[in-house]
Image: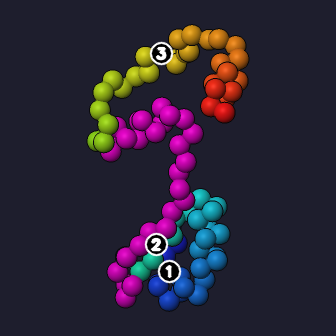
Amino acid sequence: MTTYSTYEAKAKFSELIRKVRDGETVLITYRGKEVAEIKPVKRETTVWERIAKLREQGILSGPAEKKCDWKPIAYRPGALKRFLEERD
């Protein structure tokens, strides 16, 4: 982790952002005390990863495992076309 004072961070902002884009975490200090941390954003790629993160944070509770794959109950070819035609 790289540490910068607020003065250095302001002067070298592009460099800080480049380091964060490369996956590094940057620590900002003010008069020797840590005040901010800039780190890369972790993007969840699936719904299940988002649900797991919400469970870790205590926001969501329930079964911890995936029970089934979502499948359509009924499939009628052309349903979207009929729906759009009815809207006009």
Mark 2 or mark 3, whichever is nearer to me: 3
3D distance between C-alphas at marks 1 and 3:
48 Å
Q: Residue at x 65, y 11 (%)?
A: 76
Q: Amino acid at mark 2?
A: Leu
Looking at the rendered structure, the secondary structure element under dot 1 is strand
Residue 80 in which image quadrant? top right
Q: Which residue is mark 1?
A: 4
3D distance between C-alphas at marks 2 and 3:
43 Å
Q: Residue at x 37, y 76 (%)?
A: 34
Q: State the image coordinates of residue 62 (x, y, percent, origin top left).
A: 30, 27
Q: Earlier in the sequence, mark 2 or mark 1?
A: 1
Q: Which residues are magenta?
A: 30-57
Between 71 and 61, the one nearer to me in the picture: 71
Between 62 and 17, the one nearer to me in the picture: 62
Q: Which residue is mark 3?
A: 68
Give the numbered dot on residue 27.
2
**Does 36 sit above or below residue 66?**
below
Q: Earlier in the sequence, mark 2 or mark 3?
A: 2
Crowdedness near tag 3: few (<14), some (14–19) or many (≥20) residues, C-alpha within 10 Å:
few
Looking at the rendered structure, the secondary structure element under dot 2 is strand
Q: Is residue 22 left or right of residue 44?
A: right
Mark 1 or mark 3, whichever is nearer to me: 3
Q: Residue at x 54, y 59 (%)?
A: 40
Q: Amino acid at mark 1?
A: Tyr
